[in-house]
Structures are given as C-alpha cells and as structure tokens.
C-alpha cells in the first residue's frame, strides 16, 4: 500500500498528520507531506485509511502495490 | 519614534466620506416561510438552526430570502462544497452577510484579507500568514494556554453554579490572540465588543454600524503606532514589516488582516468550547466516557466540530446565472452554512446525532477549498486544552437551567449564557 498527497487539492487542514503522524508531516506552511517514500507498513494501514477517509479535501490517494505478494 | 508614512498619527476626516457600495432596506421580524424568507438573525434560528436546515434540505434544498437585498441558503453538503470551491463565480469580498454590499472593485483584496480576498491576491496574502499558524507554530502557545485555563478554573472555586460561556470559554481565545498579536491582555473586554459590533450588529442602522466598525479600526491603528514605537516579536510587528510584491503592505491590508486575526479567532473558538461543554453538561454518558478515556478526546472534538460547527460564511454571486436549479442574480448573497453541510445525511451516517467515537468524519467545520480556516490548528489546540483542563478539574457537571441557555445570533453560533452546576 502506498499513499500520495495531491498538492493541488491539499489545503493544510492537517488531518493526515494528526491521524497518521508516521506517514504524514507538515511543510513550513502547514500543507501535508508524505514522509519518506509513501510505502505504508502493514501496522500503519489502518492509520493510512483513516487519513484518506478524514481528509476534507479528498487530497490523499491510496494505491495498492502491485504483485509484491503482500 | 519610528516614522512610517503609511500610518498617519493624526486622523482627520479624510476617507470618511460615504462608502461606495450598495445598501438595501433592512427587513426584520418573524420569518413567514423559511424556504422563501429565511433569516439567520431571528430567534428561532439562534435557538435551533438544525431543524430548520434539515427541513429545507428535504424540500428545497436551496432556500431564498428577499432580506439582505436577496440571498440564497444551500443546505446540502454537495452544494455548500460546490460554492466553496467555485471562486470564479462566488466572491469573498464580503463574508458577513449584511444590508451593505461593498463594490465589486473591492475585490480581489476585500476589507479583511485574506478571508475577504479572491484569487489571485488571496494566495499571496494568505501565504504571508500561513507559517504563523501551523500546528507546530501554535504548539508554542499551548503551555501558556493551559496555565491560563487552570487560572480560570481556580477563579471559579467556591461557586456551585458558573456561566461556562462567560466565565470560562470566552476568555481563552481572547487571551491567546491578544498574546499572538501583542495587544495588552487587559484590553480583552474591548475585543468582545468589537466582535459583537462586527458579527452581531448586522441589522443596526448603517451609520451606527459604521461608527462601531471604525472603533475597531481606531483601536488597531493605535496598536500599530504602539508597535512602530516599540517593535516586538508578534504578529502585529510582523504584518507592519511584511512585504508583498517587493514592497510593504498597504495600510488597509495591515489593519484589515489584524482585524481578521482578532475577530475571527474569538467568537468562533469561544463558541466551539461553549457548545462542547453544553453538550457534555446535558449528556452524562459522553462526559463520563471522556473523563474515563481522555485519549478519545481528539476524535470527540472532531465530532463536536461537525455537529456544532460554529462558523457560517458568506459569498457574493459575481454574475447572473442558473445554478443548481435556481436563478441567481449578480450580488445575491450566499449564506454558506458549513453547519448545514455537516448535518447532511447524504454525507454522514447518523448525521443529526453526536457520536463521539466517530472515526470517519470528513466535516467542513473549517471550510473547504482555498479559504480553509487559517486558524484551524490554533482553534483545535485551544479547544483540546480547554476541554482537557476542564475535564481534569471539573469531571462532574450538569446544566443548571437548560431554559436559561442563550445562543448568539448571526453567522457564528455558540452559547452566550451557559449556567453549569459544578458543585
């Protein structure tokens, strides 16, 4: 599973870094940023889903990784 | 004494001529039909806007009124979101619906940038302020906020019944924003008056309304002068020195932004804290659960923000158009009710109930799109700290007299009298 933020939609509500601070951080203006490569460790999948479902701008996309056996 | 020509020390009558813009007849009195004659300034709305909005959502869903010179009220989440995102067709040049429309030339800056600004100016003005209001930056205010909340609770000791709106909730955002702007903390009671003048004095005669607004700007200008004489590490000094497009800001932009920061942070957060305490005072199950499970508080706060969203915005229609089934005219108001959007059953399960462990909560309490509340991280911090301290110090409390609770009128809704039994 992999997360991405669409910077064209993000308005800096910060729900992602409130709910999933291992996956998301804030830039200097408070816009959300994906930390690292955006690959979601299994133990963070619930948090990733919460971030996606609570983003008021629907700016977070979640991709299922392909054919890596997980 | 520092000299800054933008802010003359002697104020004459220059610029006090008749304001450009259009005024309409002020219409007050009982609403005949909420679908065709709505008013957010009448007592039924203040007492319970949700029932009215739920009814309109089913039968309209975009209500109309000839008051305020003509206005529309979308009640579905989908329509509210569409207006918020469509800055091409809806202007923010006035975001408080009243009986006066500033002229189109006021755009794209508006009277209190960036909330009153349209693209492209909006983005640049907002950018000046974003860094001061990030979650990380506002966290610096948390220890002082917590200490202040404790001192407020200390001051209540020995009393059995307190007014949680006046004795607790209202003081917290006033203190925090005074600190951030570098205004004297003892001026707090004046800020309260400024807020009332701007947000609740909508149907006053125009001259009186203008007089009240100018009191605020006189105060702000005095603060600018105090900061020019003695610069400090605060938002006022920051705005005085800030540059946009290679030069310092126009004086109206400086004082307009100061007005926004002062006014927007007070009533709103006061209302959110008060509405939450009101809910907990009358809902012992939720109160007991939050006392037992403090870790649930951030989730519960989002639900309180959804269910009791304090802020409704306004927009002005730019040009005549047929929009989502209605014929809008240029300069019609849109009353942009985030509270109505937040209770749309098409968007939320159990929309009219308060579910404090609601995990999926894509609410619009802080708006949607480019005007997302600049102070949302500050508001969340204040709300969380205010509730943490209250629940720690006063875990058991009830509504003393439900009939005595009063709610503010206008676009910001929250309890203004809230008698709570704590002893």
Image (cartoon, coloured by chain):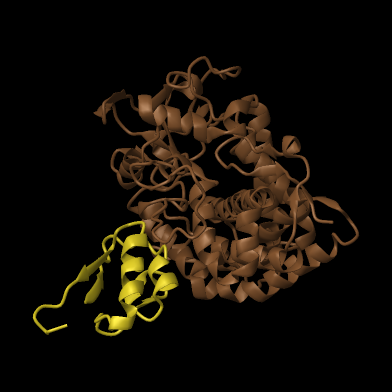
Mark yes or no: residue B158 visible.
Answer: yes
What's the residue at 26%, 80% (across, down)? A38
Q: Residue at x 51, y 20 (%)?
A: B24
**Chain letter, colour yellow:** A
In front of the other: B1 or B289: B289
Image quarter in which the C terminus of chain A is found: bottom left
Q: Is residue B62 above or below residue B123?
A: above
Q: Residue furthest right?
A: B158
Lateral position of residue B169 relative to residue B59, left or right: right
The quarter of the rendered structure image containing the N terminus of chain A is: bottom left
**Percent position of residue B128, x then y:** 45, 65
Q: Residue furthest top?
A: B32
Q: Quadrant of residue B18?
A: top right
Residue B375: horizontal and vertical position, in percent? 52, 60
Name the residue: 38% across, 55% down: B362
Image coords of residue B364 (percent x, y): 42, 51
Between residues B184 and B389, which one lies in front from this camera angle? B389
On screen, residue B86 above or below A19: above
Q: Quadrant of residue B223?
A: bottom right
Question: What is the display colour for chain B?
Answer: brown
Nearer the observer, B225 or B138: B138
Residue plotted at (26% across, 62% down): A8
Lateral position of residue B320 relative to residue B104, left or right: left
Task: Please give left or right for residue A38 compared with residue B40 in the image.
Answer: left
Q: Nearer the viewer, residue B324 or B231?
A: B324
Query: From where the camera sits, is residue B1 visible?
Result: no
Residue at the limit of the structure toward the left, as seen here:
A67
Instruction: Please state the horizontal and vertical placement of residue A61, each as a whole percent of the image.
Output: 23, 66
Q: How many marks?
A: 0
């Amino acid at each position: 599973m992999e997360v991405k933020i669409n910077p064209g939609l993000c308005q800096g509500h910060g729900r992602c870094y409130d709910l999933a601070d291992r996956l998301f951080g804030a830039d200097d203006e408070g816009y959300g940023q994906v930390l690292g490569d955006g690959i979601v460790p299994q133990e963070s999948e619930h948090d990733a889903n919460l971030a996606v479902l609570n983003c008021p701008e629907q700016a977070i996309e979640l991709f299922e990784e392909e054919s890596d056996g997980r | 004494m520092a000299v800054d020509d933008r802010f003359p020390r002697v104020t004459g009558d220059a610029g006090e001529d008749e304001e450009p813009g259009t005024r309409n007849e002020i219409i007050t009195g009982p609403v005949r039909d909420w679908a065709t004659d709505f008013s957010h300034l009448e007592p039924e709305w203040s007492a319970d806007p949700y029932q009215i909005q739920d009814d309109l959502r089913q039968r309209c869903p975009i209500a109309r009124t000839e008051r305020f010179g003509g206005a529309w009220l979308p009640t579905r989440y989908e329509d509210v979101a569409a207006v918020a995102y469509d800055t091409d067709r809806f202007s923010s040049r006035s975001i408080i619906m009243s009986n006066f429309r500033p002229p189109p030339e006021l755009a794209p800056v508006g009277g209190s940038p960036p909330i009153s600004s349209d693209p492209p100016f909006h983005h640049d003005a907002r950018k000046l302020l974003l860094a001061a209001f990030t979650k990380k930056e506002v966290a610096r205010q948390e220890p002082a906020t917590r200490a202040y909340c404790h001192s407020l609770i200390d001051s209540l000791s020995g009393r059995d019944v307190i007014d949680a709106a006046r004795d607790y909730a209202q003081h917290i955002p006033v203190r925090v924003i005074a600190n951030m702007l570098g205004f004297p903390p003892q001026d707090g009671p004046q800020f309260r008056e400024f807020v009332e003048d701007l947000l609740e004095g909508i149907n006053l005669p125009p001259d009186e309304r203008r007089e009240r607004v100018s009191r605020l700007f006189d105060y702000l200008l005095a603060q600018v002068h105090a900061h020019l004489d003695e610069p400090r590490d605060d938002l006022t000094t920051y705005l005085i020195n800030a540059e946009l497009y290679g030069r310092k800001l126009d004086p109206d932009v400086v004082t307009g932004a100061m007005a926004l920061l002062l006014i927007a942070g007070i009533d709103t957060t006061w209302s959110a804290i008060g509405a939450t305490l009101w809910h907990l005072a009358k809902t012992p199950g939720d109160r007991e659960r939050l006392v037992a499970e403090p870790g649930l508080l951030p989730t519960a706060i989002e639900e309180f923000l959804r269910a009791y969203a304090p802020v409704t915005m306004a927009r002005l229609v730019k040009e005549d158009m047929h929009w989502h089934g209605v014929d809008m005219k240029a300069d019609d108001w849109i009353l942009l009710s985030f509270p109505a959007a937040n209770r749309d059953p098409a968007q939320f399960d159990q929309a009219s109930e308060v579910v404090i462990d609601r995990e999926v909560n894509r609410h619009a309490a802080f708006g949607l799109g480019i005007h997302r509340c600049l102070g949302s991280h500050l508001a969340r911090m204040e709300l969380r700290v205010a509730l943490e301290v209250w629940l720690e110090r006063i875990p058991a409390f009830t509504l003393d007299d439900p009939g005595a609770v009063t709610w503010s009128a206008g676009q910001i809704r929250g309890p203004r009298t809230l008698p709570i039994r704590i002893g």
